[in-house]
Structures are given as C-alpha cells and as structure tokens.
Amino acid sequence: MTPPQLSAEELELLHELINIAFGRAVADLQHLIDIFVVLRPPEADLFDAHRVRALLEEHIARFGDTAFIEQPFYGDFRGKGLLVLPGGAGRDLISILDPEYDGTAPSKVLEEETLLEVGNILIGACIGQLSELLDTHSTYAPPRVIHLTPEEGIREEDLFTNGSFSLVLRTSFEFEHRNVEGFLLLISESTTFTWLREALALALERLFG
C-alpha cells in the first residue's frame, strides 16, 4: 500500500504549525505548574501501524514500565493523542503539581488522576492549538491510561486501523530539574489527508497571501 504524500512546502508549513501548537501547549502547562518544560523540536512523519508499534516498543525497552495516556479527538482533523511517560512518572508528576507533597507513596487512584490531568492538558492544548491554526475545531473523548511492561506486546489494532498510514506528529520534552521525560504523539489517520491538504493551502494563503 502506497502512503499518501505531502509536498515539501506542505511538510514545511506543517512543521511550523506543529512547532507553534506544541509551544503554546507547553506554555499552558508551565502556567499551571510554574516549572520550566524543555521542549525539543517537533517532527512529522508518515508511519504505518508497524512503525508506530516499533517506535513505542523501543521506548518501552528503554524505560521499562511505561504509561500511555491516550485521548481520541474528532472533527475534520481526527485521530488520537498518545502521551508516553515512564511508568513511575505519576509520583514525580504529583510532586510537580503539588509542592506540599511529602514523598509518601501515593495511592494508585491519585497517580492515575495525575497522569490523566497532565495528559489532558498537553494533548488537549496541542490539538486545540493545531486545530485553531488550521481553522477548524476538534472534540475529545475522555483520556485513559494504559500501563505496559517490556514483557507485554502492543497490538497494532490498538493504534489505528490495520493497513492505514498515519501522520505522526511527535515531540519529546522533560521537566527541568525533575526526573520526568517523555514524548507526545498525535496520530491522524490517512482518511484526513484530503482535508489536511486543503487546510494547509488555506493556511499558506492566510500567512503569505
């Protein structure tokens, strides 16, 4: 199956819009938690399900237990956001969000709620900003947390429709002076490519006339 293609001009513009959207999302998070977040330059790739699975399994092999915060989004631009964090990130994020946290072992419920809160902020802000830049809007399903270990496999059908190609937008980040780092994927299925090309053409016209 031949993947859909974007022109060099379309990819360049998409990279710029992603950079703006992710930067604004991180600014929203920094405003909430009052701590500097180091954001690395975003990337955009066309991946099939096998390549996304390999990317995620590489992360699991590196970090061991891994938490995935998944949130589907719908509209002209549709797909799912995946925030990928080390399995123990929940406790570290609690200490970031709550300066009075004393380091005692938090309940699983509190860890899950913290992961969901951070995931909802980052994914929602990124999708919202990118949708705004593309002159559309998106709605969201509730996020969920999935925990995986190196012994567990990732099923391709859990990522997107088998055989389809997806536009994968990704960036990595870390919280300054904290042992928390991860990356964010925005996975949009190939069914949105016709709309995306039209939206990028309009964005080019708005930006450059």
Image (cartoon, grey):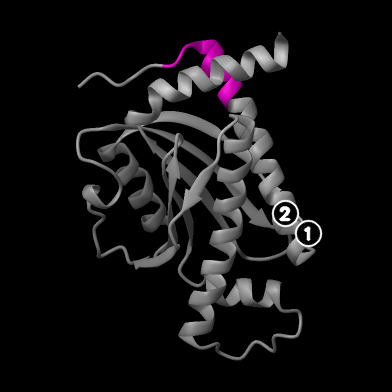
Instruction: Establish if 167 lies above or below 72.
Output: above
Amino acid tagged 2: Asp
Question: Residue 12 shows which numbered tag?
Answer: none
Instruction: Establish if 182 lies above or below 149.
Output: above
Residue 40 in sight in this render: no
Q: Position of residue 13 (x, y in %)?
A: 60, 20
Residue that mark 1 sits on: 31
Q: Position of residue 50 (x, y in %)?
A: 25, 39
Dot 1 falls on a residue whose secondary structure is helix
- Cα distance in 3D space between marks 1 and 2: 5 Å
Q: Which residues are magenta?
A: 6-14
> Do callouts 1 and 2 mark residues in contact (Cβ within 8 Å)?
yes
Dot 2 falls on a residue whose secondary structure is helix
Q: In the picture, which quadrant includes the C terminus?
A: top right
Instruction: Establish if 10 lies above or below 157.
Output: above
Residue that mark 2 sits on: 28
Q: In the picture, which quadrant includes the N terminus?
A: top left
